[in-house]
Structure formats: C-alpha cells, structure tokens
Amino acid sequence: MNINKIILFNLIAGILFLPGCTHKVRVYSSSIFNADASKRFIVKKKVFIDCPLRDNTLFNKELSAKIARHLNKFEFNETQDLKCAENYLVFNYETQSEKKIRHIPIYTPGKVHFTTGNINVPTRSRTGNFTAYGTDTVNYNQTTQETGAIYFVPQNYTEFTHLMKISIYDNKNINKDSIIWHGAATVISENPSFRTYSDYLLFSLFNKFGKSSEGIVTESFTRKKLESYWSKDKK
C-alpha cells in the first residue's frame, strides 16, 4: 500500500469513526520526570521537535505543529535550528492490531401457537313479561407464545491500540541519561485511524507534562473538553 492510499484510508476512517462532541474517549497514560534534571527543565527555552518515523512526513508535520502549540502553553518555543535548541523533543507513534472474538447476545422469540374453536355463551332475551334463557355458539381465535431464549453468538472483530510517546532530552548531551521527561499514552478502539485520536493522546500527555504520574492513569475526554481548552487562547 503506497503512502497516498494510507493517507486516504486514514482520512476516510477518521470521518466514519469521528468521536462526537459528547462521546468520551478513554486514554491510558503515564509519565516520568527526572528530578535530577529539573534544573534543565526551565520555561522559555527553545525546543527542537523531531520524529524518527519518515514514511508519513505530512502527518508528522501536523503532529509537530500540535505539539508546538501545547509547548507554548508552558512557555516553550519551537525552533527549527537544532544548534540553537536547549532541549530536544522526540515523539513516536504506532498502531497495533489484534484479532479478537466477542459474544453478542441474540434474543430468539418463542414459538407462536394459534388456536381456534367454538364456545357456548349464555344468552338472555326478554319479550314483555317473558324472559328466555339459552346459549349461543361463538367462534374464537387465540394466540399464545412460548418464552423466548437468549443465545450468545461469537463475532470476530479487530481491536486497535494507538500508542504515542514523547521524550525531552538535554540537547547538549542526547542519551538515555540526559532524558528530562517521558510520557506515553494509549487509546484502544475498533477505529483503525490513529489521526482520529491524536488530539486526545496529546491532551492526556501534556496534562502530565513535566510531572511524574502515579502509575498508569485512566482518563476520559470529550471533543467538547478539548475545544474548550483551546478556546481560552482565543479570548
């Protein structure tokens, strides 16, 4: 599959499965802050943003712009000149798929029985002072239904795990020991489009920017909440 087909597939999938304003997206995230490197984590610093993935340059630029916008909230400024940057930010993302089976409850109505017959109905008629009693034959139709049952039918489906990671290093000495902050976020969905959930993943990650989380944190966000967060910049 070439890059144009991949982009088209993600756009179509994103439209079909786009979460609504009130739909909540669950995000699992965690973060680690290197306390020993806290002196290097100073606001108003220049940050160089990079991504090791090279097969989707257009989408990488979109994510880089979104990350830069989040960094501005913390008074960090993006620079395109690596030599001028005090910090080096690298982000990575991937989507993993797994085939699964779930059991769907299906209700099956009970069997319907139709019965017809005749019954004698008592009658009474009065003529003057005379009352006559008798019977009359009436036809009837009766419908009864047995109790239904619920069966669980297996259904095959694909579960997609969308993962995003962000790490910030001291640009003067980029290695595992110079890492200042690292965060990872995951969304699990049946939607194959990573792009659909990129805003939610970034929002969750930058909620913990410069901090350490206590293990894995589970959060739920709506599109409306994300829009409200950014609307404050427009005022």
Image: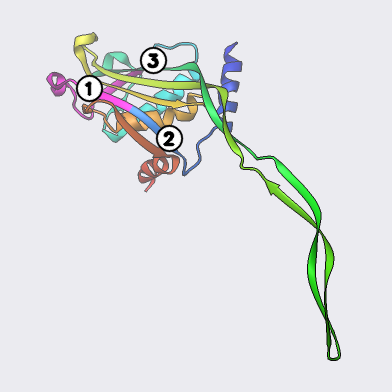
**Label 1 secondary element:** strand
Point out the tag, 1 or 2, that comes first from the N-terminus.
2
Query: What's the distance in space between the residues labelled 1 and 2, CA to CA?
Result: 23 Å
Circle on res. 51 = 3
Q: Is residue 192 visible?
A: no
* Residue 16: x %, y % from top left: 58, 32
Q: What's the residue type where badge 3 is placed? A: Cys
**Labels 1, 2: front one:** 2
Is residue 69 shown above or below 133? above
**Is disc 1 surrounded by few (<14), some (14 to 19) or many (20+) residues within 10 Å?**
many
Instruction: Give the quarter of the figure containing the N terminus.
Output: top right
Q: Is residue 16 visible?
A: yes
Q: Which residues are drawn in magenta?
A: 29-49
**Is disc 3 surrounded by few (<14), some (14 to 19) or many (20+) residues within 10 Å?**
some
**Labels 1, 3: front one:** 1
Circle on res. 32 = 1
**Label 2 secondary element:** strand
Residue farthest to the bottom? 129
User: Mark 2 = which residue?
Assistant: 25
* Residue 232: x %, y % from top left: 35, 45
